[in-house]
Image (cartoon, helix red, strand yellow):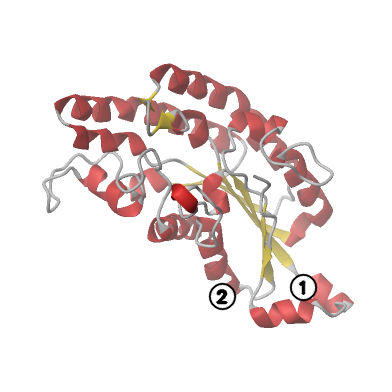
Amino acid sequence: MPPRIAITTAVGAALLALAPATPAQADDVTYYLALGDSLAVGAQPLGPDNATIPTDEGYADQLYAKLRAEEPTLQLVKLGCLGETTKSFVQGGVCSYDGAKSQLSAAKKFLREHGAKVRYVTVSIGAQDIYGCITPDGGANTGCMLKGTASAALYMPQVVGALKLAAHHSTRLIGMDWYNPGVAAWLLGDDGKSQAKQSVLLNDTLNSTLKVNYGAWGFKVAKVNADWQSKNWTEDTPFGWPRNVWELVARSWIANVPGVWLPKGHGYGNIADTFYAVAR
């Protein structure tokens, strides 16, 4: 599915955009560039037969609303791609972009063209490499996950390095670490509880890869994993579930739509809040 490359504004601002902008108006415009996978798009399973479709409830949309309340000239540009992995982010092949072979190429072009006017860049990437290996029919494919972990380690330096070199020094670059959908296996009985515990190692490996690369290139990190309490096994919830399982089920679709671990609207809101704390 082609990505939605949208510039989101309030209705009044959109009407003004129909008329030629004066030089002063053009000079005032700044940008928030949202990059990455389905989370950057705001995807949710709301289509026919629970098909995953883009929405305007993603973390980028909700973060933009917070930022624009303080910066009225800020505009949102979304280049995210449903199903994007670190490899396809660099090499392309999932979504198409005018004049660019990949999301990374499109992002570099935008950053170079707009320079200091790009106030913020957020990146959510890497989870599809691993958690894309979870399917409703086959469950979690361990071999696929291990291969995805290696792929993320290979391509993340190219993702963050190229973005950093293309961005203006004043642009705020923010990546995110990942909550762990694997803890949902805890609900499947004794074997599932063991799998849920083992999933922490895989999630830690992914997040370590992301944090090392983000840190090496001067990105800040939105600590989504901590906010979702992915490592909190305290059984203090109403059903006696561990806190991490409770938070995952409450914030995502994983208990409603098999194999879909995307956040619900309020879950995206939680991620937006985590990004906002770093942006500010």
Distance of mark 1 from mark 2, alpha carbons? 15 Å
Return the mark for residue 28.
1
**Taking 159 as reference, is 254 left or right?**
left
Q: Can residue 224 be spotted in the picture?
A: yes
Return the mark for residue 83.
none
- Give coordinates of residue 236: x percent, y percent: 12, 49
Q: Are marks 1 and 2 in contact (CB under 8 Å)?
A: no
- Residue under the point 37% across and 29% down: 137
- Callout 2: SS: helix
**Taking 49 as reference, is 26 left or right?**
right
**Taking 182 as reference, is 177 left or right?**
right
Q: Can residue 280 be spotted in the picture?
A: no
Q: Quadrant of the N terminus?
A: top right
> 144 above or below 95?
above
- Give coordinates of residue 253: x percent, y percent: 36, 49
- Callout 1: SS: helix
Q: Which residue is mark 2?
A: 69
Neighbourhood count class around disc 1 (C-alpha, 10 Å): few under 14, some 14–19, many 20 upward: few
Neighbourhood count class around disc 2 (C-alpha, 10 Å): few under 14, some 14–19, many 20 upward: few
In terms of image quadrants, where is residue 77? bottom right
What amino acid is at disc 1? Asp
> 230 above or below 70?
above
What amino acid is at disc 2? Ala
- Residue under the point 64% across and 77% down: 10
Say which of 226 and 261 sits in front: 261
- Residue under the point 54% across and 52% down: 53
Labels 1 and 2: the sequence-earlier one = 1
Say which of 250 and 272 sits in front: 250
- Give coordinates of residue 184: x percent, y percent: 28, 38
